[in-house]
Amino acid sequence: MKITNYQSVSVKNFNKPLENHRKDNAGMQRTAALPSFSQRADNWMHVDKQKFEKYKQAQKYVDGCDNRYMLLSSYDSDKLEGIQYGIKVFEGLNIRQVILLVDSLHAICTSRTCSNGCVHCYAEAKPFHVKKDDTGTITKMCWEDFCDLTDGIRKFANRMHKTANELPYFKSKTIAPFIDADSMEIVLNDQKGREYDMIDISKKIARDLKYHIMFDTSGWTPKNKKTQERAQRYVDYFKQQYDNGNKDVVVHISLNPFHKLNSKYVEYINSEPKRAKKFRELYTDRMANVFYTFLPLDGVKVLNRALSEHSSGNELYKYEAHVKLIKEIRDKLEEKYKADASCTPESAKKYLETFDRITKDIYTEDLGATGRLENLLSKDDADLKEALKLHKLNHQHPESILTNKRGFVGSVFVDANGRVYATDEYNTIATDIQLNFRNKNKKTPPIFGLIEGQVSSDALFKNLKDNFII
Ligand code: SF4
């Protein structure tokens, strides 16, 4: 794409309406078209002539490169500076910051709260209640900010003559729209209060970033009709994706003894067995319903985890107890099929066989857990060390978070307010990158494993460049 083409291409993209008018079963329009805020954005080139000149020089430089084979970190960043000008969400960022973001982006925190309270949660997710009069705190991204982010990356990729999923060095086909939220609980709002769910998020990410989303759930309360209907819509949508050959769409059901409801059972079983059993029933009912809803989605996977038999933790969190838990859920699932007049014995048999197949392997190594799991185990437990992967960040060189010694390459995520964090899953540190979000001045819930201070994007960029140029 040459500079001369730039204006027409950008204007075309800016004005394209988002195709997310959809109707629910009752024929009501559920979500609305994206408001026209994005159509105003290209005025910068008339307003700021100096910046536009700089942009043109940068675009000329890119046009002269063999972009197909170049990593972002191997461009001359001085010559590239300016290519990001006019992209609203990147306003105020230099090119090194933009490269860091798009090269290492792994997750977008569309929502920062979770009601499940799993004791093994590596992100230590929990519910976060904002007081009514607290207008300075948010727990989720607003839809317009989310759109600005995906639009911005798409535009940047266009200018680099790439698609967004060709930008990162480590190419992945999926992106997580969360770090500490359950996918079933993610619903964004726009400024007018309209709702956007994981289908809207998924479509936007597929269209702009060419990625599939990761979808993980630990279930929902079966009596919650609204969520149950939403789950059904998700199953239909993901089925459609699979039918269209999008096999990389990742849908996980999280099945483990660590969920808040089952952990209450573990807590009370000796002191208050009656109460404990109620919690157990709630958990097994919930999970039977999750499988009942999601099993028609051929390709759904299970995150099936427990403590190993030789760990020092409570027996009821271990492998053998988990096998019993799975059996209880299976029995309830079988009952549901028997009670369902529309389900033939053949279908029930097929679904139960699928259940057996996908719940067969129980993962007991490297649970990828942090703080809360630590409380379940004794401190000198070798498994604890393995489970917690006691990797500590080198505080002298926090930029090593993107290329640490374990060979695991870290990544960055965007918080709901547009602040960018670098993480290796166990340590997280704020960067000096702040996206130009509407909610950039709002507070968000505390981030897990956060190391004090801030790492400079110049240091991170240098690290990226030193480590990844081939
Ligand atoms: S593991 Fe997932 S579902 Fe459980 S508390 Fe953490 S984010 Fe929520």
Image (cartoon, helix red, strand yellow):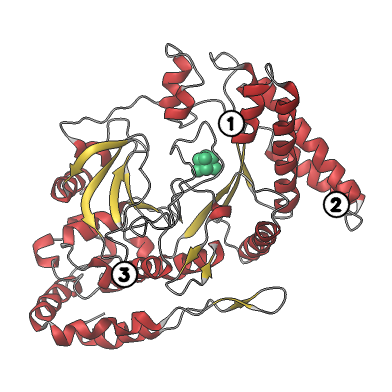
Amino acid type shown at disc 2: Ser
Q: Which mark is residue 347?
A: 2
Check disc 1 and report its element: helix, strand or loop: loop
Whether disc 2's CB lies below 8 Å from ligand 1 is answered no
Residue beneath label 3, please?
Answer: 152
Front disc: 1 or 3: 1
* C-alpha separation, residue under disc 2 versus residue under disc 1: 31 Å
- Give whichever of 267, 93 is nearer the camera: 267
- Horizontal and vertical percent for residue 311? 54, 15
User: Of label 2 and label 1, which has the lower sequence position?
Assistant: 1
Q: Residue at x 56, y 79 (%)?
A: 21
- On the picture, is 441 further left or further right than 447? left
- Give whichever of 323, 446 is nearer the camera: 446
Whether disc 1's CB lies below 8 Å from ligand 1 is answered yes
- Give whichever of 316, 87 is nearer the camera: 316
* C-alpha separation, residue under disc 1 versus residue under disc 3: 39 Å
Amino acid type shown at disc 3: Gly
Q: Assess disc 3: are there few (<14), some (14-19) or many (≥20) residues with their C-alpha within 10 Å of its C-alpha.
A: many
Amino acid type shown at disc 1: Phe
Front disc: 2 or 1: 1
- Horizontal and vertical percent for residue 429? 26, 41
Q: Assess disc 2: are there few (<14), some (14-19) or many (≥20) residues with their C-alpha within 10 Å of its C-alpha.
A: few
Q: Assess disc 1: are there few (<14), some (14-19) or many (≥20) residues with their C-alpha within 10 Å of its C-alpha.
A: many
